[in-house]
Image (cartoon, grey):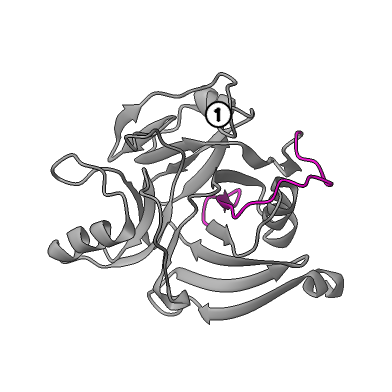
C-alpha cells in the first residue's frame, strides 16, 4: 500500500458529497499529470450527445451547455466521446436514447480506431461498462447509450498487446475505464503528453480498473467546472456528459 501511494498522488478539488456522485481531481502517476473525473452511473445522469434538436452536431461544450440551460438543466461534466468523420458523424457504433445511429465496426483498419481489439462504452440505467467489441457482439447488451472507439487500453486486467513500454509516440490523450460491477466510470485526460503504455497503466495500476478504452488524442477536451476546465479547440463529434437531470 505504501508503494502504491508513492506512485499515485491525488489532489482532490471536487469530491462527491451528499447527493452528488461526481468528483473531479488532479492526479499525478509515474511522472505524468492527469485530470480525472469519476461518475457513479446509478446516481448520476450520464449520457451521450451528438446532434441538437435541429439535427446538427453540438460540436462543442458551449453549444451543449446552452441547449441544456434552455431546457432547465445544467451541464456538470463533459468530454469528447469517440472518433468521428469530418462531418462529425461517429466512426463506429453509436447508440443514443436506445436508438442505433451507427453499426458496430469489428474489422481491423487504419489508425487508432482499427488497432484491434477496440471497444465500446455502454451506458445503461444503473451502470456503465467498457466492453471489448467482440465481447459486445456476443453479449448484445441493451445499452441506452453506446459509443465505439479504439484501441482498448485495458482488457480484463491486461494491457493492449500492441502497447510498447519504450514507445516514443506521445500525445495528450483521453479515455474511460469502468469497474467490473459497472458502478464506477472514470474519465481521464492527460495534462502532459503520454504514450499508450503509460496511459493504460494509469487505468490498470493507478485506478485499478479492469477495462479501459481510448477515446481520442489530439482533439481531447474536458468540461469540468470544479477544475476550472472548459476546453476549446476543434469541433467534436460524440460527447459524453453528466447533467443535472
Main SS category, magenta section: loop
- Taking the spot 69% from the left edge, 55% from the top edge, the residue there is 194
Q: Residue beneath label 1, please? A: 133
| Residue 108 left/right relative to 228 | right
| Residue 118 left/right relative to 241 | right
Place of residue 195 in the rendered image (x, y in percent of width and height, measured from the top left): 71, 50
Front position in the image: 106 or 131:
106
Whether 178 is among the magenta residues is yes
Give the magenta part as a residue range. Answer: 162-184
Residue 227's place in the image compared with 40, above or below, is below
Q: Choose top left, top right, bottom left or bottom right for residue 68.
A: bottom left
In this rendering, the count of numbered labels is: 1
| Residue 154 left/right relative to 71 | right
Residue 27's place in the image compared with 213, above or below, is below
**Can you see residue 188?**
yes
Place of residue 11 in the rendered image (x, y in percent of width and height, measured from the top left): 62, 80
- Taking the spot 55% from the left edge, 32% from the top edge, the residue there is 113
- Taking the spot 28% from the left edge, 62% from the top edge, the residue there is 62
Place of residue 115 in the rendered image (x, y in percent of width and height, measured from the top left): 63, 29
Residue, far top: 107
Secondary element at image label 1: helix
**Can you see residue 125?**
no
Whether 225 is among the magenta residues is no
Amino acid at each position: 500500500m505504501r508503494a502504491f501511494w508513492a506512485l499515485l498522488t491525488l489532489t482532490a478539488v471536487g469530491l462527491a458529497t451528499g447527493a452528488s456522485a461526481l468528483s473531479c481531481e488532479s492526479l499525478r502517476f509515474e511522472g505524468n499529470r492527469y485530470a480525472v473525473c469519476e461518475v457513479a452511473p446509478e446516481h448520476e445522469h450520464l449520457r451521450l450527445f451528438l446532434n441538437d434538436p435541429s439535427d446538427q452536431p453540438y460540436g462543442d461544450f458551449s453549444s451543449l451547455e446552452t441547449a441544456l440551460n434552455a431546457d432547465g438543466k445544467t451541464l456538470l461534466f463533459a468530454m469528447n466521446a469517440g472518433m468521428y468523420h469530418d462531418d462529425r458523424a461517429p466512426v463506429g457504433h453509436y447508440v443514443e436514447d436506445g436508438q442505433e445511429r451507427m453499426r458496430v465496426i469489428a474489422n481491423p483498419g487504419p489508425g487508432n480506431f482499427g488497432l484491434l481489439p477496440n471497444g465500446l462504452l455502454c451506458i445503461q440505467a444503473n451502470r456503465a461498462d467498457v466492453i471489448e467489441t467482440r465481447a459486445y457482439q456476443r453479449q448484445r447488451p441493451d445499452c441506452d447509450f453506446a459509443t465505439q472507439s479504439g484501441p482498448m487500453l485495458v482488457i480484463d486486467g491486461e494491457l493492449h498487446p500492441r502497447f510498447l513500454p519504450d514507445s516514443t509516440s506521445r500525445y495528450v490523450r483521453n479515455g474511460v475505464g469502468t469497474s467490473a460491477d459497472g458502478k464506477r466510470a472514470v474519465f481521464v485526460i492527460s495534462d502532459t503528453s503520454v504514450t499508450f503504455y503509460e496511459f493504460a497503466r494509469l487505468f490498470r495500476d493507478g485506478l485499478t480498473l479492469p477495462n479501459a478504452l481510448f477515446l481520442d488524442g489530439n482533439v481531447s477536451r474536458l468540461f469540468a467546472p470544479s477544475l476550472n476546465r472548459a476546453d476549446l479547440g476543434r469541433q467534436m463529434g460524440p460527447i459524453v456528459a453528466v447533467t443535472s437531470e
